Image (cartoon, rainbow, N blue to C red):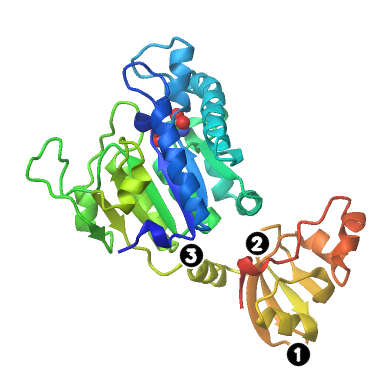
Amino acid sequence: MATVANAKRLVIKIGSALLVDRHSGQLRADWLRALVEDVARIRTRGTDVILVSSGSIALGRRLLGLPAEELSLEQSQAAAAVGQIQLARAYAEALATHGITAAQVLVTLEDSADRRRYLNSRATLEQLLRLGAVPIVNENDTVATDEIRYGDNDRMAAQVAVTAGADQLILLSDVDGFYTANPAHDPSAKRFDVIDAITPEIEAMAGEAGSGLSKGGMKTKLMAARTATAAGCDMAITEGSGLHPVRALEEGAPATWFTAQGDPQQKRKQWIAAMKPKGRFVVDAGAASALGRGSSLLPAGVVSVSGRFGRGDAVELADETGRALGQGLTRYDMADATRILGRRSAEIKELLGYPARGPLIHRDDMAI
Ligand code: GLU
């Protein structure tokens, strides 16, 4: 079974019901302070932490004096615009007391569906973590229309975990795990400690309902688990309303762990290898042996490019004798790749008119 202590990159999803008091609509500042203490402690072990936090709509609706009943889409979007400022500030202030910088990242469904945008979000998250910041991610509810919304942060958190190559995802929820039936209605319901495979039987056990403030029910949590585990990320559901919820989980609080299928790097490589290539890069002998040692592909090592590919598409890699080396996701489209091949990275800005996005293919985006 996974343990938080082993996480290299951890995504923690915080539900609205934990962060915002159901009755007063106010932020639970003491809870947030305790959560952030957990985050600061985990980071001292060298674990990267990304927070996916709900709560913007719950906070914003009170500030705007919106009614208690279900909001229209426009009302939710207005509430999110107002509440997100408060939410981000609360995290930034709480993290700052530990000398940690918060970064706000607002995403939409399109950011993961579109390969180019997916690569951009991945690179930005990577950069933020490298610079020591804690990304605070939420859905960009204000601009997302219904058709392009996740609508729930469970699935979004799983997608963030996949995008960031996280090896663990914790859903802090108002239930302490996944049950054989809804424990609120069925007293004989039993909680699973570990679920190794999401079978049709398991699926049938997930009901529809969510609680008052949060959008997701067990169904969205199960979908999140499917996404995360398939990409090599373990996922836990645990009850998070008490102070120090992550520490509690580490100390054995009830939870359900969904077991990852493989590890994130290996899964990502399989995913890349299985893509249909849109082009082909021929590399020189020096680059071919560097790729074999796990290096990124620089424009200088590329002899020719062919095909019709956009940024983020898969391309085949071959050496000058025609031997296939593998494939990878290109960071440049056909036109730009053609312009910079054989050139040094320092020349790219001049050639393209914008600063380099690093290598032509990053080593994390390659299956050799
Ligand atoms: N993005 C929404 C918010 O911040 C929450 C969605 C959810 O509860 O899962 O209010």
Q: Is residue 39 visible?
A: yes
Q: Which tag is nearer the camera, tag 3 or tag 1?
A: 3
Q: Note whether ligand 1 is within 8 Å of mark 1.
A: no
Q: Is residue 255 above or below residue 99?
A: below
Q: Amino acid at mark 1?
A: Thr
Residue 144: name its quadrant: top right
Screen quadrant of the N terminus: bottom left
Q: Amino acid at mark 3?
A: Pro
Mark 2–mark 3 contact, CB under 8 Å? no
Residue under label 2: 313
Q: CA distance from mark 2 to mark 1?
A: 24 Å
Q: Nearer the viewer, residue 46 or 20?
A: 46
In this rendering, position of residue 187 left or right of residue 303: left
In this rendering, position of residue 263 left or right of residue 319: left
Circle 1 sits in a helix, a strand or a loop, which is it? loop
In this rendering, position of residue 76 left or right of residue 107: left
Neighbor class of circle 1 (other Cα within 10 Å; few <14, some 14-19, many 20+) is few
Q: CA distance from mark 3 to mark 1?
A: 32 Å
Q: Which mark is residue 264?
A: 3
Residue 167: name its quadrant: bottom left
Please tell me which residue is depicted at 34% across the width and 36% down the height of the picture.
243
The percent coordinates of residue 354 (x first, y second) are: 85, 50
Circle 3 sits in a helix, a strand or a loop, which is it? helix
Please tell me which residue is depicted at 50% across the width and 71% down the height of the picture.
266
Circle 2 sits in a helix, a strand or a loop, which is it? loop
Q: Is residue 152 visible?
A: no
Residue under label 1: 321
